[in-house]
Image (cartoon, rainbow, N blue to C red):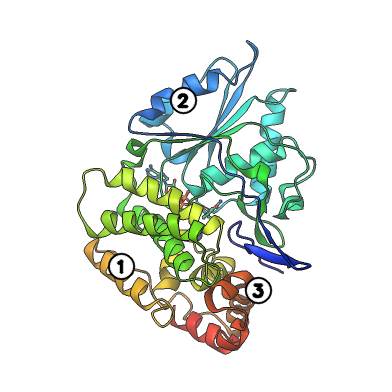
Amino acid sequence: MTAGLPHTRIQLTFTQGTYPMYRNFKIVPNIIFGRGSFNQLGDVLRSKRPTPDSTMVFVLDDVFVGKELEQRLPLEKGDLLLPVNVDDEPKTSYIDQLVAQIRATSPRLPDGIIGLGGGSAMDIAKAVSLMLTNPGSAADYQGWDLIKNPAVYHVAVPTLAGTGAEISRTTVLTGPEKKLGINSDYTLFDQILLDPELLAGVPKDQWFYTGMDCYIHDVESLEGTYLNEFSRAYGEKSLDLCRQVYLEDHADKDDKLMMASYFGGMSIAYSQVGACHALSYGLSFVLGTHHGIGCCIAFDQLEEIYPQGVREFRAMMARHEIHLPRNLTRDLDDQALETMATVALGLAPLWENCFGANWREVMTRERALDLFRRM
Ligand code: NAD
Ligand code: ZN
C-alpha cells in the first residue's frame, strides 16, 4: 500500500536541461469575504443557473441538519440538499455513492455543487463535482493530474477554518489502496465564500485542532528548504494571524482565523509541508486519526525539529486548556508501527522540504519509529 502527498504540494522547481521550471499555479478565481456574506450566496448562484430548470446540489455537513444554516440555504425548485457525514474522513467509496445518488435524482448534470462545512465537507464537494464529469470511481483518480474533464462548477462555504482546503488543488480521499488526494487544476473551487460568522458554534477542541493545522502549515513552510518569497509572504502573515487568534484576545478572531487558513494554504501551495504532516499521515493511515488532531499529536513530539514552533504551540494549548490524547501507539504491535513508518517515510517531498536532499540520513526509520512510539 502506498500513501501519497497529503496536500497538493509538488516540488516547486525542477531542472529540465539547464532551465529551472516553475509550476504554473492556478488559484481560486472568485472570493467573497466578510461577516454576513453568506446572504449573498443565492445571488452568486443565480448567475450560474442558465435555464429555469437549472439545479444545484448543496453538500451540507450533517452537523447542520435541523440548524439555522440549513434553513438559510438559498435552495430553489429542483435543487438537491445532500447532507454528508464526516465522522470518518472522506472515502472514495462514499464519493462514488454520493455521485450515484445525484445521478439517480436527475438525468442531467447539476449546474453547481456547493460544499458547506469543514475540510471534509469541502473535499467531498470537490470530489463529487469532479466525478460527475469523469467516468469510473474516485479511486481511479487519486494521484496527480489524472482528471481529464473539467468539474461541475463548485463553490465552498467553510464553517471551520485551518485546513486551507478552500484554496487547495486537492481533495484528500482514503481509497481501497491508499490515502491520497485527487490533485488537479480542475479540483480548485470556482468560488469561495468566506463568512467568519459561520465559525460560531465550532466546539473548542475542534476549533483548536483545525486552527493548529494552519499554524503547522505556516511553521513547516517557513522552516522548510523549499521556502521562497511567495510562500514566505503568505506564511508570515498567516503565522501572525494565528498568533493573534491563539495568544491574544480579539473580537474579530474568527475573521483572522479565516484569513490565516487561506494564507496558510497559499503558502504551502507553493512550497510544501514537512515532518509533522508526514508523521500525521502515518497515524491517520493506521489509526484513522483525523487530520487536525493528528497533526497536533505529531507536532508535540517535534521540538528537536521545530523548537520555537513547538514551544509556541504548547503555549497556545495551555492558554486554551487543550489536553492532547496520549499513548495512542502504546498497544500497537511492531507491524503496525512499521506500517506507520513506511507511510510517513514514503512522503519524500515533505522530508526533503524539512531536511534537504540528504533527509534519509537524518530521518532514519529508527528515528521515525521512535517518534511514533512516543505519540
Ligand atoms: P472536518 O471537516 O473533518 O470537521 C470536523 C468536525 O467539525 C466534524 O464533526 C464537523 O461536523 C464539525 N464542524 C464543522 N463545522 C462546524 C461548525 N461550524 N460548528 C460545529 N461543528 C462543525 O474538520 P477539518 O479539520 O476542517 O477538516 C479535516 C479534513 O480536511 C480531513 O479529511 C483532511 O484530510 C482534509 N484536509 C484537506 C486539505 C485539502 O487541501 N484539501 C488540507 C488539509 C486537510
Ligand atoms: Zn494540514
Question: Helix or strand or loop: what does disc 2 sit on?
Answer: helix
Residue 31 vs residue 163, the one in the foreground: 31
Residue receiving disc 1: 323
Please name which of the two marks, 1 or 3, marks the residue nearer to the observer. 3
The quadrant of the image that shows the C terminus is: bottom left
Q: Quadrant of residue 333?
A: bottom right
Earlier in the chain: of badge 2 and badge 3, it is: 2
Q: Amino acid at mark 3?
A: Gly
Residue drawn where x is 77% and y is 51% of the image = 140
- Distance CA(mark 2)–CA(mark 3): 41 Å
Residue 190 relative to residue 214: left or right: right
Q: Is residue 329 above or below residue 188?
A: below
Residue receiving disc 3: 346
Bin the neighbour count of mark 1 within 10 Å (Cα to Cα): few under 14, some 14-19, many 20 and up.
Answer: few
Residue drawn where x is 46% and y is 25% of the image = 41
Percent of width and height locating residue 148: 78, 43
